Amino acid sequence: MAERMGFFTDTSVCIGCKACEVACKEWNRVPDDGFVFRATSYDNTGALGANTWRHVAFIEPDRPVTGDGLDGWLMASDVCKHCTEAGCLDVCPTGALFRTEFGTVVVQADVCNGCGYCVPACPFGVIDRREGDGRAFKCTLCYDRLRGGLEPACAKACPTDSIQFGPLDELRERAEARLDRLHREGRSNARLYGEDPGDGVGGAGAFFLLLDEPEVYGLPPDPVVPTRDLPRMWRWAAAAAATLATVTTLAVLGRR
Amino acid sequence: MAECHPVGFQWVMEAKARGATVFHIDPRYTRTSAMADVHLPIRAGSDIVLLGALINHVLSGGHEFREYVLTYTNAAHLVSEDFRDTEDLDGLFSGFDPDGRTYDPASWAYAHRSDAPPPGEVGGASGAGRGREHAETAEAETYGSGGAAADAAPATDPTLTHPRCVFQVLKRHFARYTPELVERACGIPRAEFARLADTIVACSGRDRTTAWVYSVGWTQHTAGAQFIRAAAILQLLLGNIGRPGGGILALRGHASIQGSTDIPTLFNILPGYLPMPHAGRHEDLDAYLASAGPDTGFWGRKRAYLVSLLKAWWGEHATAGNDFCFGHLPRLTGDHGHYATVLGQIDGTVKGYFVIGENPAVGSSGGRAQRFGLANLDWLVVRDLTLVETATFWKDGPEIATGEMRTEEIGTEVFFLPAASHVEKEGTFTNTQRLLQWREKAVDPPGDCRSDLWFFYHLGKRVKARMTGDEIDRPVRELAWDYPEEGPHAEPSAAAVLREIGGIGPDGRALDSYTELRDDGSTRCGCWIYCGCYAGEVNRPARREPRGGADPWIAPDWGWAWPANRRILYNRASADPDGRPWSPAKALVWWDAAAGRWTGRDVPDCEPDKPPGHRPPSGARAEQALSGTDPFIMQADGKGWLYAPFGLADGPLPTHYEPHESPVANPLYGVQANPARVVYPRPDSPYNPPRSPRFPYVLTTYRLTEHHTAGGMSRPLPYLAELQPELFCEVSPELAAERGLVNGGWATIVTSRTAIEARVLVTERMRPLRIEGRTVHQVGLPYHWGWGGDGLVTGDVANDLLPLALDPNVYIQESKAATCDIIPGRRPAGPALRELVRRYREDGDG
Amino acid sequence: MVRAFVGSCPGMSRRDQPPGGGGRPDGRPGGRIRRWPVLRQLLGEDPRAEAARSARTDALRPRTADADHVARSVCPYCAVGCGQLVYVRDGRVTQIEGDPDSPISRGRLCPKGAASRQLVTRPTRRTRVLYRRPYGTEWETLDLETAMDMIADRVVATRRQTWQETDAEGRVLRRTLGIASLGGATLDNEENYLMKKLYTALGAIQIENQARI
């Protein structure tokens, strides 16, 4: 397997331009998400879903902004986390979801039968079924581009390099360095999110530098994959099935 | 900048990562503010107070870059004894004619040196009436390249202590622009001002530079040109012009808006900022040249520039014997700008109108006047990618809804011609840094879509074929209009047109440089500042060395910058008077004594072999009149102008005036607003009275990154339309409480022009300001929506709210600061809308 | 910063590059039977390691790789002048994205620039001439050549009707105020040049564009 690739989204340099949302839709031919004014700051696409694979959240200041420009208006581009332990993939009964040679998690639209099991299995609420189509869609980390040696469309477009793409280990190092710098500059609220392999999803393939609590951005503070114990459960189930099969066989044989 | 030029903003982020401090000055806290170190909220239209206070801070603290100021600016020049400042006349400069609302600038001149020959006529005319003519033809803009004609050798005081030297005049003029005044007039607390002032002083000088970046937040005011002048004065005092990391950078909002100024589709200039001739004053070529800018500095070659242009246009018909067809040029008689044209449509003088890739029915101030003008035309041609509102006003415009217009009573004949997109034709854009970039054609345009090059070329051919032997047809008959045609649609060759623009020599070869242009008719050049863009028969704007070649910061091999592929203008100032870089960190060009030439990373912006110690002989002309220490080579005296003795319609120095519509009194002078501003007081151009309690709030308009201008290129696109689907207004929680506005609900915004409705966004990012001891609220409105235009999303037209009040130098409208009322709920529809506005106007007048 | 990610994945040898066909990227023995979930469960394999890679998935590659040619262009929105690469296949624009060689933009685009393929290829784009006759209530269709002739006729006639040779004081004007024009800030230099040249020869002076507005 090749080196694991991922995203590091540094929200401290996100200017909220939404180039990522558009570049993603252009490349992946994702339909628009409707034309609804949400009166939620500058966010009118709402959340990640079948038709929005990159989503820029805007968090308005809750107090009058002061002369100090920093941290007054938070912007962050959210995306599928490409979890190490991916609930969506675990529960997919058709094999439509698979882990690629880049360590990313991708839905195959030609295999998906629209059962929707994956939707509640995602602790981040990322994957979703497309209305009128029924199948599940989400970020592929531009699997087709990666196979051709290109970086994902969102990361390429991002004007300020808020979205960085690369080998996950390298991104983690870069993120630590950035975090150190922000802390040295007195921005003590800065933190990494999703980079820890010990977290409830085994670490994310797409992680973030946030400037406030995850909840502020609408992210779960402590996401846990609902299928965390699945391999063990699978083995228990398999053993039970084997036992049952053996007993049945013996029983059948015994009747002879 | 993050909002409207996000990809350019990456370089600000890069600078910040390297330790730059970023200040963002804006009425609103925007996406740019969120990335800045400091956001300074400012009352819209009060910028000269802030900039003036920074100038005062520099001057009173002795923070100026003395050596730079002394040698490279006009600080030492003495001003005429007749000059009176706004400090003396309560807001007026000397020479004001209250009847004509114009200035005679004679008294602003430099004091003439007693031992020098008398200066020629200033600008070719003198005395009363010159100011009015000047104002009426927006001639100030014609000095963009040339600088105004002025005495090249005035009396000076190198000690900068003479009371009438520019330096002292400046000190007195700005003495009352204090941090206290900034707090009172702009709403910026003193401590925050101090942080700004201390930072720019600390970040200027030999080793460091400060850059100012602006957009239409500075230009779209009734004193917009003076906003820029104020920044120029500050930057000259701090030594930040002509040096890497310095400058005053205009961020322009359209792909080739710089190009459309250089090669102007503008009424008052010809290509290369040569002025259009004026009736009566410019009867022949000599009379024109006598007043078309100075004879010293590089502008002194203006005859070669104009004659080469006339040769490009009228070819073999242009000869020395007929003034090179100078007589073929039409003459101006005053204001022929966009808004005057619209009023001309209403009044019936304008019969036919071409609208090419614009949407004035939505994008221009006072949209109602625009549409009443369109409805009174004989014929209208609209060329666009989209069926914009300007093409459909007769069918679905707001005045149809109010019952003021009826489709079957509108006589305008309308042609809509679909345009080719940027990938369906080849040609050059000139970007905001003067860089020409050639685009390759990717595919053929679909259906009837054609390039504008195709349209105007083939229209020209048809018009020429219809010409008669009449004398009035001669300029068209004789027009050189012969370009190679390519492909199934007979597309004219854009490369051939670019080559003509770039200049062709007597041997038929493309010219290398504008210094090769001749005034004898032997050279042809469509735009002298673009001369050399096809040098060596190479399409230089098409050059694409990855990252611009060996030096990625200068990037000399990517595209081509005018003039002469020079990336930083006036870069002689990056070296000290002796020709050495001010500091190694800021080295750009320098004098190589051994080689006897200027050299460096950029193309030196001076004569390459003129040594720093060179002093010009008396009576020298053109560039030969410049010394080796004159960096501002287009100016008559080679100096950066702290004080403009001529060339501006509203004064030699920036002065704070309130916007035409303002809720507060001018805190400095009895004169409330720019006395020379252009207004059109007539029933179809109404105004809110100043300080009207009926219109108590400041209104400011702007763009969002998700859309483009009037929306023609963004509202029809699903991926952009979904990002900002509705017109909204931004208000503070305090204003929302005061007016009962609810986040997500509706508001109606009212001015004397009309009322529009918008969704409400209540945000802490809008800060109420304390101005003169009371709270002033600002209402923010993006202006991308219209009622149709093939838009997937529609909305009321924000520009309909704005007045027709213009800067007198450049005729740009004041769309960044007006007054309004805001009330909860949707606006009335139909005739009731006009009734609402009528009531407001009656109350306002009362 | 991984910008120059062209040709191969960093940290990935050529051998590791996934094959174009239906093989398996991890080199383990294949076979439909081994992919059967129940068998994998019995074998205790982590089902997350390998799912049913469809033939379509195995064939995936960026559509830009199939372009017939790539045009080097410039974004048509603001004046920053970001470089664009326009990918064309079978005469259609299949993708527009940033040009990494540009020293201005380094391959990046804003949302408008990123949407510019949609600007060019959207199905609702107008591609036919429309005509509204005076006092008409609906659009009509018109042949492009006919429209060009009609416009030329109107230019010539209006120019004649509104020609001003001199003013009341006898000063030479040689112009018409009957024809005006607005536009140019999104046009090419070559287009603005021909516009100004033709209009000036016609004597039309009210020539303006967005630079004023």
Image: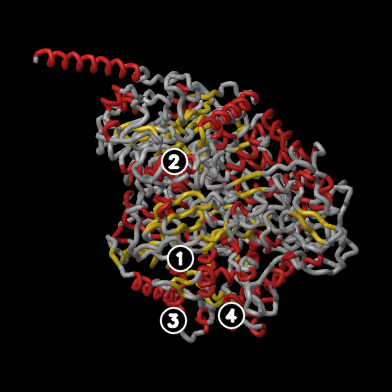
Q: Earlier in the sequence, mark 3 or mark 1?
A: 1
Camera-nearest label, 4 or 3: 4
Camera-nearest label, 2 or 3: 3
Q: Residues within 10 Å of mark 2 (few under 14, many from 20)?
A: many
Q: Residues within 10 Å of mark 4 (few under 14, many from 20)?
A: some
Position in image of residue A245 (x %, y %)? 20, 17
Quick one: SS at disc 2?
Answer: strand
Quadrant of image for the N terminus of chain A: top left
Q: Residues within 10 Å of mark 1 (few under 14, many from 20)?
A: many
Q: What number is the disc on residue B452?
A: 1
C-alpha gap between disc 3 and disc 1:
20 Å
Q: Please name the amino acid that badge 2 sits on.
A: Val
Instruction: Return the residue at label 4.
Output: B315
C-alpha gap between disc 1 and disc 4:
23 Å
Position in image of residue B464 (x %, y %)? 46, 79
Q: What number is the disc on residue B750?
A: 2
